[in-house]
Amino acid sequence: SQKIEQNSEALNIQEGKTATLTCNYTNYSPAYLQWYRQDPGRGPVFLLLIRENEKEKRKERLKVTFDTTLKQSLFHITASQPADSATYLCALLTDSNYQLIWGAGTKLIIKP
Amino acid sequence: ETGVTQTPRHLVMGMTNKKSLKCEQHLGHNAMYWYKQSAKKPLELMFVYSLEERVENNSVPSRFSPECPNSSHLFLHLHTLQPEDSALYLCASSQGASAEDNEQFFGPGTRLTVL
């Protein structure tokens, strides 16, 4: 069956370190992969999109990689800050289906 | 008002009630979505509208009825809901519904509790 997996346990990182979140998928051939941030009581906010032919994408302190062989995307936050604490969601989009397919998200906690 | 707005932010209703959720987007987008979000579970797509026409209905029970009168407004009409329908209901919009235009902008959600 088709599945997207993100770490269900919260990730605790010391301020200033790099946080790395994982998104694994099976039985998909995504054309695009998106990352969103969601704060408690609010809707998700789009962060980055990476296409299947791109290995890496950067935006300020954020970096996303996309390995279609491993069927995995990694989301990195460098020089992490307590304000980066939130739940991070990955979502896939295939060419044949314009619906985003979502992971359940990983809660990131940055400790001062 | 900018972005995507939703009203009400919180709603408590009995199983026999009829209520409606409202969403409005001020971004000039052509596609709008309803999602259900339950704790620790992925977002579940309920309905997609593109240029005011419903393009997707993911086998949602008929007690949920969407309405899209124009490209800026989306409603979700609720009737005879069940307690398991309690969740956060999120509205989103995107430039289009195709792959290239699918960066989605979300509203703050309506926290629904069914008693």
Image: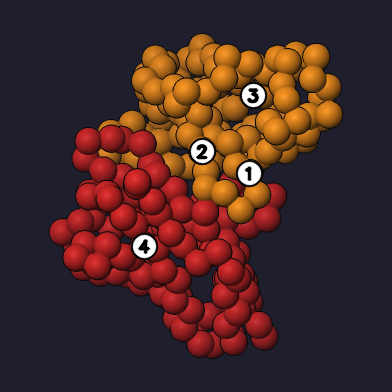
Q: Are marks 4 and 2 in contact (CB under 8 Å)?
A: no
Q: Are marks 1 and 4 in contact (CB under 8 Å)?
A: no
**Residue type pointed to by label 3:** Lys
Q: Are marks 1 and 4 on the same chain?
A: no
The residue that label 1 is drawn on is B38
Pointer 4 chain: A
Residue B44: assigned label: 2
Pointer 2 chain: B
C-alpha span from label 4 to label 2: 18 Å
Residue A62 is situated, as x and y percent measured from the top left of the image, at 40, 71
Q: Are marks 2 and 1 in contact (CB under 8 Å)?
A: yes
On-image quarter of the C terminus of chain B:
top right
Observer-side mark, 2 or 3, equals 2
**Residue type pointed to by label 2:** Glu
The residue that label 3 is drawn on is B22
Find numbered disc 1 in the image and state the secondary structure of the residue it sits on: loop
Q: Residue at x 27, y 39 (%)?
A: B99
Residue A84 is situated, as x and y percent measured from the top left of the image, at 57, 71
Q: Earlier in the sequence, mark 2 or mark 1?
A: 1
Rendered view: B53 above or below A65: above
C-alpha span from label 2 to label 1: 9 Å
Q: Earlier in the sequence, mark 1 or mark 3?
A: 3
- Chain letter for red, please: A
The residue that label 4 is drawn on is A24
Q: What color was chain B assigned in the picture?
A: orange
Observer-side mark, 1 or 3, equals 1
Find numbered disc 4 in the image and state the secondary structure of the residue it sits on: strand
